[in-house]
Image (cartoon, rainbow, N blue to C red):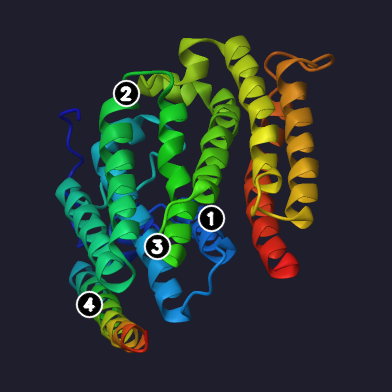
Amino acid sequence: MTAATPTAPALPTDWRDFFALTKPRVMTLVIFTGLCGLLAAPVPVNPVLGFTAILCIAVGAGGSAALNMWWEADLDAQMKRTASRPLPAGRMPRESARDFGLVLSFFSVLMMAVGVGYLAAAILAFSIFYYAVIYTMWLKPRTPQNIVIGGGAGAFPPMIGWVAATGDVTLMPILLFAIIFFWTPPHFWALALFVEIDYAKAGIPMMPVVAGRHSTRRQILVYSVLLLPLAMLPFWIPGGAGVVYGASALILSTIFLLLALRVAVFRQGVGEADMGPEKRLFRFSVFYLFALFAALVADRWIMG
Amino acid sequence: MKQMPQFPEDPEAERKRIIKQRNLMLGGLLGAMVVLFYFISIARIGG
């Protein structure tokens, strides 16, 4: 953490700023994938306990996001995309974000343990530690592979959802974890390519800043190629997903791969500075994850 | 997200408004947690 401290606000902090610390947009995806993990599990879940599990996943994600914002307040101040967040904008004392993050993290794990189960609570606790400490504090400022490693943090929710329902870690939740893990680099590097200047200014060793655009585009393609068979694995393994998921995964992953090819290989008629293909890949990657997990749940409901 | 006014016309009234809203929000959350724990207990007792 760097030393600068934002100016103390003249007014008390508005509750909306506390809410903003939880990164609500990211939380939407976390809730969705966690819910899909829960609903795709092959056992019926008590609605109250299912709701509690999703609430705990969401609150835990919010807590780790607040800790992330506390630690990165100075970096956020240097980037246009993040400069209006509560801490860099000076609307909140830094310690409030830290305490808020710790309280949310603690209560989410406690409630998961008491209400749902110890294994789900243990994975939730590890995911918070992974994002706030291993990723944010340790690896993000040190290695251009930060996004690959950070992908692990975002990959936990469906696994926690599944474990909350079944109480067990099997191959399927590990596959759901792996899909998000391999989806994250092309998703995030596509974004990093068109906000590259911001990262460079903040001194974050993001792949396009360190390895250059060409290498980043190639690596986007590599992960996109790996994502296709990985997304198909739940269809191939015995007792996995059915044909609804299989067909959806094949179509979605093929489109993903074609967009990645456009980014990495077929750039004829697209200038080096034109980030159209990257923006299209980024937008589709968000839709891809929502659609893939929705297909998994639909498959469970339709195929039984 | 709503931006805080930098120079409110009446800082004391603005301060009271923010604190009141925060207290209401916190109270609502605590109340919701009590209700949730109540239902979790029923769900777990029911097996």
Mark nearest the camera among 1 and 3 is 3
- Measured in 3D between alpha carbons, the distance from the residue under mark 1 to the one under mark 3, in whole angstroms, is 18 Å
Q: Residue A221: x, y in percent?
A: 67, 22
Q: Residue B44: x, y in percent?
A: 33, 83
Residue type at tag 4: Asn
Mark nearest the camera among 1 and 4 is 1
- Measured in 3D between alpha carbons, the distance from the residue under mark 2 to the one under mark 4, in whole angstroms, is 37 Å
Which residue bears the numbered disc 2? Answer: A141
Using residue A194 as the reference point, say whether residue A124 is left or right of it: left
The answer to whether tags 2 and 1 share a subunit is: yes
Which element type, helix, strand or loop, lies under badge 1? helix
Query: Residue A295 appears in which quarter of the rendering?
Result: bottom right
The residue located at (80%, 16%) in the rendering is A266
Residue type at tag 3: Gly
The answer to whether tags 1 and 4 share a subunit is: no
Callout 1 touching callout 4 (CB < 8 Å):
no
Which residue bears the numbered disc 4? Answer: B23
One can see residue B8 in this view: no
Mark nearest the camera among 2 and 1 is 1
- Measured in 3D between alpha carbons, the distance from the residue under mark 1 to the one under mark 4, in whole angstroms, is 32 Å
Callout 2: few (<14), some (14-19), or many (20+) C-alpha neighbours within 10 Å? some
The answer to whether tags 4 and 3 share a subunit is: no
One can see residue A148 in this view: yes
User: Quick one: label 2 or label 1, which is nearer the N terminus?
Assistant: 1
Which residue bears the numbered disc 3? Answer: A167
- Measured in 3D between alpha carbons, the distance from the residue under mark 4 to the one under mark 3, in whole angstroms, is 37 Å
